[in-house]
Amino acid sequence: METHAGGCLCGAVRYETAGAPQRVTVCHCRYCQRATGAAYMVEPIFPLAALRVTQGTPAVHSQASAGSGKRVHAHFCAACGTRLFLTFERWPESCGIYAGTYDDPGWIVAGPENSRHIFTSVRRPDTVLPAAVALYAEHVAAQDGTPLPARVLDAPE
């Protein structure tokens, strides 16, 4: 199985993921904006079992999600502060990787067939949403797990 490695800025913490992501979530929520210092987070989602820390031990910061009330656990390098991956109380079998921490982040492709944009209702006003991709104003599911409808654009907006 193909693996891809990544790590923090200082090199103290390294990880690898096995296989392809289940999907790629592009999250525009305020948590992800603050956590990345950017307009949104590109987050390939993997089964937790596909992630292996190969060097060091990440520190963890846990915080309740404003959207679900469930805890989100940000795993980061205590030495340099780089956020590496997220684990979730709501989805304990999954993890989300901060795509920019891969040694070659270009291997992650977020296309119409494998990605979705969430929390588009709070996106930066200068962010262009792509055509043919599932777009959600908030989460993809209600608190009880009921799927919410996606919007798909014919042209970028």
Image (cartoon, rainbow, N blue to C red):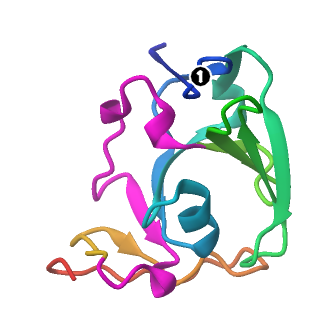
Secondary element at image label 1: loop
142 w.r.t. 21: above or below: below
The amino acid marked with disc number 1 is Cys
The x and y percentages for residue 137 are: 49, 85
Q: Which of the 4 image quarters holds residue 51?
A: top right
Q: Residues within 10 Å of mark 1 (few under 14, many from 20)?
A: few
Residue 89 visible here: no
Residue 40 visible here: yes
Residue that mark 1 sits on:
10
Give the extent of the magenta segment.
97-126
Name which residue lies at 69% across and 81% down. Answer: 142
In the rendered view, does 142 fall on the left or right side of 98?
A: right
Name which residue lies at 70% across and 20% down. Answer: 53
Q: Which of the 4 image quarters holds residue 55?
A: top right
124 w.r.t. 55: above or below: below
In the rendered view, does 113 fall on the left or right side of 9?
A: left
Name which residue lies at 55% across and 28% down. Answer: 9
The x and y percentages for residue 101 are: 50, 34
